[in-house]
Image: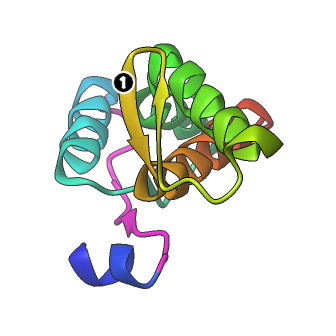
Amino acid sequence: MAAARAYGLTILDSVCNDLEDAAGFEWVCRQGSDLGFDGKTLIHPGQIETCNRVFSPDPGEVAWARAVIDAFADPANAGRGALRVDNRLAERLHLTQAERLVALADAIAGAP
């Protein structure tokens, strides 16, 4: 997990072969999310909705991430290493994390 993050790679949890156990599939998705995986490889279209729901970022986190991106994009903040965004400290490392989170949310939103 640490190596994938260090190199900006997406890391996916392995498949769940039991197509009949919806509760079990949701559990393994939650486990993978808790462990830090970005998503899960799927073998059946019936798994998409659950996987997207579990791995989707919290809407509040996405809103803050968008605010961080906007704050660093503001020309008035050019060259600044840290900003206050909605009364929280946002550093350049948070910008990178925000961009990744928004990309994930947008990808899931565009999924079938």
Amino acid at dot 1: Arg
Q: Which residues are magenta?
A: 8-21
**Viewer-proximal residue, 17 or 14?**
14
The answer to whether 70 appears left or right of 7 in the picture is right
Q: Is residue 16 magenta?
A: yes
Figure coloring: rainbow
In the rendered image, is residue 108 in sight?
no
**Viewer-proximal residue, 9 or 74?**
74
The answer to whether 40 appears left or right of 102 in the picture is left
* Element under disc 1: strand
Percent x, y of residue 37: 33, 57
The answer to whether 11 appears left or right of 104 in the picture is left
Q: Residue at x 61, y 50 (%)?
A: 99
Viewport quadrant of the C terminus: top right
The answer to whether 32 appears left or right of 87 in the picture is left
Q: Residue at x 48, y 77 (%)?
A: 9
Percent x, y of residue 57: 47, 30
Q: Residue at x 58, y 35 (%)?
A: 68
The residue pinned by badge 1 equals 88
**Viewer-proximal residue, 101 or 30?**
101
In the rendered image, is residue 7 in sight?
yes
Place residue 29 in its image quadrant: top left
Percent x, y of residue 19: 41, 42
Place residue 25 in its image quadrant: top left
Q: Is residue 59 above or below residue 29?
A: above
Q: Majority secondary structure of the magenta segment?
A: loop
